[in-house]
Amino acid sequence: MTSNIAWPVKIREFHNHHFDSTVWNDFQFRDDDVVIATYAKAGTTWMQQIVGQLIFGGDPTLEAANLSPWLDIRIVPKEQKFAMLDAQQHRRFIKTHLPLDALVYSAQAKYVYIARDARDVVWSMYNHHANALPQWYDALNNTPGLVGPPIEPPPDDIHQYWRDWMDQDGHPFWPFWESVRSWWAVRHLPNLLMVHFNDLRADLPGQMRRIANFLEIEADGDNWDSIVEYCTFDWMKSHAATTAPMGGAMWEGGGETFINKGTNGRWRDILTAEEIREYERKANSELGEACARWLANGGTII
């Protein structure tokens, strides 16, 4: 019985150069909304593409990331985001990077949380950060309402970037462990689906059927093969002007930079054996062994 479920409750606000969590306080949910949640660089745009293609039944011209606004990003006025979503007649799908306790949670909406090993997240984040154009910094640092320090360009050395990220928990973006931990804690809620980046890579059709079933969307139509094709990484990369947010306009190289490699393990040639052990100890300490194991590998959730 859903009436006996202890639904998550928002207990704090979260602000920085990217975030304004207060936007959720005034958001009017529809019962069939889909919220795509993730720390960042864990497959967010990939999941937006998957959900968008499932909702629209396979459309190669679909600009899923642009139809699916990042609701808590502070550089776009709340009224603009609300007006866009209010005007949408299709089933809405919305993006958030907030930890669960800074988010208003709807018992009727559907939530998909996608996760990825933190080491792969950081390598993808570095590409995202190092290729950002001046207008990206201008928007984040000069839009009125900034709380906290501005975001600065990354160091040239990705190894130093990793050390800063580890030593300062997600620096210069936002804390990592609390995001994963907060969503993992409620992983058995009936309207939450936990998805891992590795599982999408290993069996995209199977994972897409799992997502479609969760969203109560038919996955056996004649165009199923096309829907899956439009969600492959290679297809998204070759159509990056359509699949990347704003066509990748804020990054050097455009959409093909934003939709980067989609590969894992690039950290193995740079991190030392002791740094890898340090990370694994930290993951176990912050998340517990079951969550840390799932974060590293994917697979069945217990």
Image (spheres, helix red, strand yellow):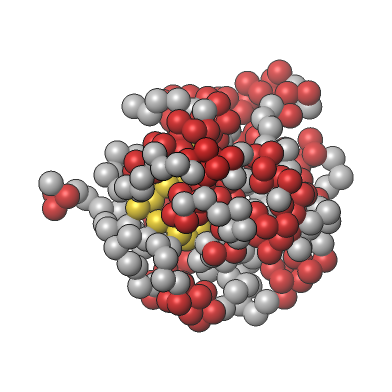
Q: Where 12 falls versus 110 (above or below)?
A: below
Residue 145, percent from left and from top: 61, 77
| Residue under the point 28% across and 44% down | 189
- Is residue 85 among the parts visible in the rendering? yes
State how many labels appear. Answer: 0
Q: Position of residue 208 (x, y in %)?
A: 46, 38
Is 17 left, or right, of 83 in this rendering?
right
Up/down of 190 relative to 10, above or below: above
Q: Can I make out residue 38 in this image?
A: no
Q: Residue at x 65, y 80 (%)?
A: 144
Location of residue 166 (image quadrant)? top right
Can you name the residue that lies furthest to the top here?
Answer: 273
Observer-nearest of 85 and 97: 85
**Image-based side of 150 in relation to 2, left or right:** right
| Picture layout, residue 203 above or below residue 219 | above
Q: Nearer the viewer, residue 280 or 204?
A: 204
x, y percent for residue 180: 47, 42
Give left or right: position of 185 versus 65. Answer: left
- The quarter in which the C terminus is drawn is top left
Q: Measuring 45% from the left and 72% from the top, which residue is drawn there?
A: 88
In this view, the residue in front, 134 or 177, is: 134
Q: Position of residue 125 (x, y in %)?
A: 69, 46
Residue drawn at point x = 65 percent, y = 35 percent? 120
Q: Quadrant of residue 77?
A: bottom right
Q: Which of the pair 123/154 is nearer the observer?
A: 123
> Which residue is outermost to the right?
156
